[in-house]
């Protein structure tokens, strides 16, 4: 994953919640795009989880991003 790919996911309309899986087995659920902060050419991002804990994540440690498709 790259910063550009993350920004593309954050800007989808409507935003679809994500589960971000890390190399150490951690899975971070993201319900809203404003829970992620990144720079366009950055090598890392900040992600806030459901318990309002902040995670500093290097993109190289993201193994999978699962989109939680919204249903009507």
Image (spheres, rainbow, N blue to C red):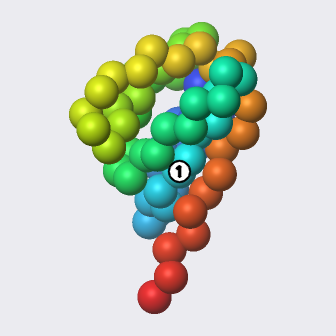
Say left or right for 65 vs 40. Answer: right
In this picture, is 13 found above or below 1?
below
Evaluate whether residue 4 shows in this view. Answer: no
The location of residue 34, given as percent across then percent down, is: 31, 40
What is the number of callouts on the image? 1
Residue at mark 1? 18
Q: Toward which corner of the image does residue 24 lie, by quadrant?
A: top right
| Helix, strand or loop under label 1 | strand
The quadrant of the image that shows the C terminus is: bottom left
Which residue is at a point 66% across and 30% down the rendered structure image? 25
Residue occupying the far front of the picture: 25
Q: Foreground residue, 56 or 43?
A: 56
In this picture, is 29 found above or below 67?
above
Residue occupying the far bottom of the picture: 72
The location of residue 27, given as percent across then percent down, is: 56, 38
Say left or right for 20 vs 49. Answer: right
Which residue is at a point 34% across and 32% down the rendered structure image? 48
In this picture, is 11 found above or below 27?
below
In this picture, is 41 found above or below 11?
above
The quadrant of the image that shows the N terminus is: top right
Which residue is at a point 35% across and 50% down the rendered structure image? 32
Evaluate whether residue 30 shows in this view. Answer: yes
Q: Residues within 10 Å of mark 1 (few under 14, many from 20)?
A: many
The location of residue 58, given as percent across then percent down, is: 59, 14
Which residue is at a point 46% across and 46% down the rendered structure image? 29
Q: Foreground residue, 51 or 37?
A: 51
């Amino acid at each position: 994953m790259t910063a550009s790919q993350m920004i593309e996911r954050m800007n989808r309309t409507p935003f679809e919640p994500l589960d971000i899986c890390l190399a150490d087995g951690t899975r971070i659920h993201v319900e809203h795009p404003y829970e992620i902060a990144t720079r366009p050419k950055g090598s890392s991002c900040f992600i806030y989880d459901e318990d309002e804990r902040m995670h500093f994540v290097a993109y190289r440690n993201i193994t999978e991003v699962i989109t939680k498709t919204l249903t009507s």
